[in-house]
Image (spheres, rainbow, N blue to C red):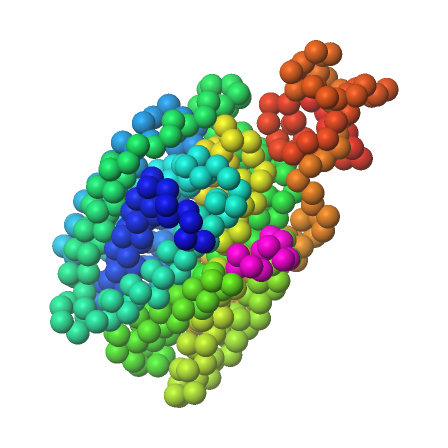
Amino acid sequence: MLSVMRNRTYRHLFTAQVVALVGTGLATVALSLLAHDIAGRGAPAVLGTALAIKMVAYVGIAPLVGAVADRLPRRALLAATDVTRAGAALALPFVTQVWQIYVLIFVLQAASAVFTPAFQATIPEVLPEERDYTRALSFSRLAYDLESLFSPALAAGLLTLISYDWLFAGTTAGFLASAALVVSVALPKPAVPERPAGARAKAAFGARLFWATPRLRALLALDLAVAATGAIVFVDTVVLVRDHFHRPESALSLALGAYGAGSVAATLLLPRLLDKAGDRTVMLAAARALPVALAAVAALGAAPPSTWSWVAVLVVWALIGAACSAVLTPGGRVVRRSATAPDLPAAFSAQFSLSHSCWLLTYPLAGWLAAGAGLPVTAVVLGAVALAATLAATAIWPAGDPAQLDHVHAGLEPGHPHLAGARPTRDGWRHRHHYAIDRNHHTWPASGRAPSRS
């Protein structure tokens, strides 16, 4: 796996991702404590609303970024968004009202909605080989996992020395370091799409790509299952720890660290599992564990607090982390497999936006339900969502899902460059190749036929 680190550009980009994630992890702990200080038992509703605002920024802005990303200097775009995020994080310790949290979260997350899809689309251009890209995805997931494990532990240690307000300074430093690393390397120029150049057409293409590709529709359903489960962790852990178990602030970091530990363990096993079983098998198996975990959360939230139930919470959080990682990590492989190289920015922007629309639903649901009906009811409702999403993904994603498909072009003229090697049939021109929705393939093959137009 370490061979990809020999690529200087990727090494700098990966390091930028790591330091930014550590800063984000510190902010996650600090924001939870800030919300608890301002709103008390209403903290889940505040966090749920703040995270919903984050998702609004992601869902609304990411498709627009995908539409214009090929026109903007990639390095300047990434660095500018890092500086913007640093400024928003620096202002958070000074808020005194809930609405101020909401404004700063929107600014910070709007910048993240620009940064993340552009960053994701850059990596397959830096590492064009499938084997290298797969390892880069594992490293990326490992970075998220180690952040979930390391940042809460770092926050717990720092909180013994300083107040949580100072954790936001670490977030600012992380974003500024990320910007410095990005500008230290030259990035490849994005491939020019063959689709119409209009921004509206580009933004619409990403959504159409997901709608027309069965495995991408299944990926979106799996994202909903992860969002339903992850919302419990990120929104309701602070109330579970502070109000149900009456444990100190450092216990919040311990619980989030357990989630990260499970995620790390799964990520380390994934490259070998994916080589043996494939994306579909691994992702669906992990998704089936999510509603079971939420049933356990409901039971633990209803049980009287005790030492054994606290330990059980840590175990369940670790299992949730492992299952979510096993669903999310191969997602980049699924997207890359389903789009041509020029369409990768639009594909990743669509994936970013659509997947976060799932969190836009589950974050406020987790916050408002927990504040009004309690954690056990919240876990049951979100468990039902996760179960329905997993069953839908299983039905949508074909068990036999080859990359290359036989199909017929009925609308292309003889001599069209795409028909090289195709053989004429009664219905048009038949050939077999890696299949993805693009200007020559507008629908998914049914019975070997793919209507197209020149």
Which quadrant would the C terminus be assigned to in this image? Answer: top right
* Front residue of 39 and 126: 126
Pinpoint residue 287: horizontal percent, then vertical percent: 58, 61
Q: Residue furthest right?
A: 426
- Residue found 58% across the figure and 56% down from its top: 274
> What residue is shown at x 55% (from left), y 65% (from top)?
290
Can you see residue 314? yes
Residue 292 image point, x, y percent: 57, 71
The part of the chain drawn in magenta is: 270-279
Position of residue 414 relative to residue 180, above or below, is above
Q: Is residue 277 magenta?
A: yes
Instruction: Examine the image and state in which quarter residue 246 appears.
Output: bottom left
Work out whether 184 lies above or below 104. Answer: above
Q: Is residue 363 above or below residue 217?
A: below
Q: Is residue 316 left or right of residue 250?
A: right
In this rendering, is residue 82 above or below 368? above
Describe residue 382's horizontal placement relative to residue 181 as left or right: right
Residue 178 painted magenta: no
211 on left or right of 169? right
| Snapshot quadrant of residue 69 | top left
Residue at 46% across / 67% down in the picture? 265
Which residue is located at x 18 percent, y 51 percent?
Answer: 173
**Residue 370 appears in view:** no
In the rendered image, residue 192, in percent from the top left (x then y), is placed at 46, 22
What is the chief secondary structure element of the magenta stretch?
A: helix
Number of marks in the rendered image: 0
Left or right of 416, for residue 173: left
On the image, the x and y values in percent for residue 417 come to: 65, 16
